[in-house]
Image (tube, rainbow, N blue to C red):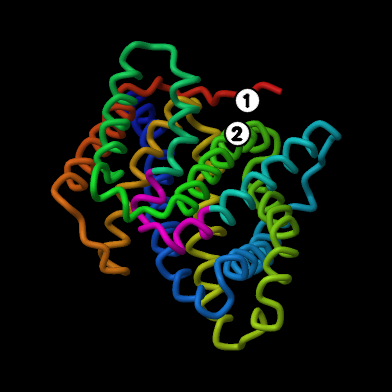
Amino acid sequence: MTSSSRSLVTTLFPVALLLVAMASIQSGASLAKSMFPIVGAQGTTTLRLLFASLIMLILLRPWRAKLTVQSLRTVIVYGMALGGMNFLFYMSVRTVPLGIAVALEFTGPLAVAIYASRRAIDFLWIALAVIGLLLLIPTGASSAGIDLVGAGYALGAGVCWALYILFGQKAGADHGVQTAALGVVIAALFVAPIGIVHAGAALLTPALIPIAIGVAVLSTALPYTLEMVAMTRMPARTFGTLMSIEPAIAAMSGFIFLQEFLSLAQWAAIACIILASVGATLTMDSPATPAVAAD
């Protein structure tokens, strides 16, 4: 393999991981909504994270990671951000369509991309992503149908998503994919009391176990492991901008699994977001140097 071929593989590998992770997590979100009538968004989040933590404990054995006081603090913040992001997102999609909820949530990683940008070309891709987001979010008369509380939950999930990116990169640089397992365990411990208080004994419903395991794999164990690998192999600005494809995947997942039909404006938004992601990929530094979040 020539040096140029190796460079291309190095550039495209984390991008491919992100695409698989985002498709998986949005498919899992659609499946998770089927659990809401029984245990609510709170219980669904709890079951998802509990099963995901068990899976990742078995597969990754994170207790082997040697943590310092500083790295432990970073992992704890990462895990709490992960738990908050999951919880607030599920609280949002109770009343807000999946594509719109993800578009609002994306304000977090978009802010990371803007903050981390250093070249003029990066702002072109960010501008395209913003146009896409504006087209995904209904305005005027159609905006009356958006639940403001649900929208607020989605924006809160965006704040947690930004923290997840920043602290996940730093934690992942220290301990790799084991950090993802540690983060999910901390997230489960953080959210479980809320789900137990809300759903109680309904969490033990036998029929929910196969669905919960499926959601855990699709929405947590698989995508967060892949994201942890990807985010340590590219700059923060590139990771944040590439995540702009998430609302498009969510909109398509909502259409396929939840029959949430898309308007022409939303299809135009998907085109803008994909173009922004492709542009960011083509202009990525090679080899990519992972960005380290500041303390």
* Residue at the spot 40% in from the left edge and 57% down from the top edge: 96
Label 1's element? loop
Q: How much space separates mark 1 and mark 2, taking CA atoms?
A: 7 Å
Mark 1 Cα-neighbour bin, 10 Å: few <14, some 14–19, many ≥20: some
Magenta: main secondary structure equals helix
Q: Quadrant of the C terminus?
A: top right
Does 137 lie within the magenta span? no
Q: Which residues are magenta?
A: 89-103
Mark 2 Cα-neighbour bin, 10 Å: few <14, some 14–19, many ≥20: many
Query: Could you tell whether 4 is left or right of 77 in the image?
Result: left
Question: Dot 2 corresponds to which residue?
Answer: 169
Of the image marks 1 and 2, the number of the one nearer the N terminus: 2
Q: Which mark is residue 238?
A: none
Which corner quadrant of the image does residue 176 belong to? top right
Q: Which mark is residue 293?
A: 1
Query: Could you tell whether 70 is left or right of 192 in the image?
Result: right
* Residue at the spot 31% in from the left edge and 68% down from the top edge: 258
